[in-house]
Image: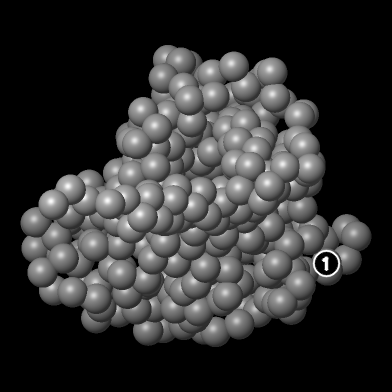
Amino acid sequence: MFKLHSALALLALLPLLLIVLTGSLLVFKFEIDSLLMPGQVLVQPPEDARRLPLDELMARINRAQPDYELGSWELFDDARTADRVYLIRRGSEHWFKAHLNPYSGELLDQPAGLHHALTDWLLNLHYTLLLDGRFESAPHLGLIVGLLAAICLSALGISGLILYRRFWRHFFSFRRDHRPMVVTRQLHRLLGIWSSPVLLLVGLTGLYFNAVAYLEESGEHMEGGHHIMQERLYNDSLDFEALLADSHQQISGFEPTYLLFPFEPGQAFTVFGAVPGMSILASEYGSAVSYDAQSGHVEVAYDLREQPLLARAVDSFRKLHFGHFAGLPSKIIWALGGLCLVAMPLTGVAMWYSRKRRQWTRRGTTVQPA
């Protein structure tokens, strides 16, 4: 088990360092965006301001950006956060991102690539290590490497708990009066004990996200690639504000948070959202109502409260992965856990090198028989 633990750590050393370091920063993605791009991500509406009707906002976007079609839309009504609108350029399969003031209808910036902002670039680095699309023979190499790194991270957490299964005996013990390598070994053990819950949760949820993304992307490319957006795929005459209001009727207490427009022929217009009565781990997108994109008729109403335990557990992966289930306190804990994960490979490599150096020294001083 010790050899397996060491081999996995050495095998995934560089990807894990990049993944956990970027993950520690992305825990504070909104805070970083607010600091670096306040004019795009934050709004300051009057006290009595209300969101404009969805149809009016859509019309303004379509007039301002005639070369793009709506792909998806993150809704916010906290009098602070700008909506995030995702657009697809006509004649291509490429997605772009823009920010919208939902109280005035003003686009706060021009559509930019999905990885244009610093935190979006970090998110791409986190999931794909910037390797996707680099090689024609392996278009999803980054997702595959990320998936393997997540498997290694999960296996390291499990094997570490097995190796230190009596961790409670040394939970707070740390002596600095030993030689440096003993201190390094103690530090490695303590960092692993303290961060093991975060390590396992991040590893297992990351494994799930990378696996799902890879299966979706590889499936689409096997069928000939993404759809090239040539024309609007939903009925312009639909009353989308009425559909939003209807979603409240379809699911009791439903609060819309995300709109997904059809980006391939035959897809529905779907409203994702949150419902009351769920745990703090439930995501803001766990329930959904789908409408026929041409007629507006209800196709599916999915209430997370009525789903089995497995579905609710999978829905919690989003908050568990990034640690924003309890506000700032859980974000800080997740970030500190990520920093522990950054330090652990470094102490682990130091331990491995010290052990190998002793072996090389013994071999060099041993007299071989004639």
**Residue under the point 10% across and 69% down:** 137
The colour mode here is one colour
- The residue lying furthest to the right in this view is 47
- The residue lying furthest to the front in this view is 370
- What amino acid type is highlighted by mark number 1? Pro
Q: Is residue 261 left or right of residue 257?
A: left
Secondary structure at numbered mark 1:
loop
The residue indicated by pointer 1 is 45
Note whether 132 is above or below 337 in the view shown.
below
Q: Is residue 81 left or right of residue 317?
A: right
Note whether 230 is above or below 166 in the view shown.
below
Viewer-closest of 93 and 12: 12
**Residue under the point 14% across and 60% down:** 221
| Residue 326, x across and y down, in percent | 73, 36
**Residue under the point 77% across and 53% down:** 78
Q: Is residue 36 left or right of residue 1?
A: right
| Residue 248, x across and y down, in percent | 58, 34
| Residue 43, x across and y down, in percent | 77, 69
**Within 10 Å of the Cα at label 1, are there few (<14), some (14-19), or many (20+) other Cα atoms?**
some
Q: Is residue 222 visible?
A: yes
> Total of numbered circles in the picture?
1
Q: Is residue 331 visible?
A: no
**Residue under the point 9% across and 56% down:** 222
| Residue 279, x across and y down, in percent | 65, 23
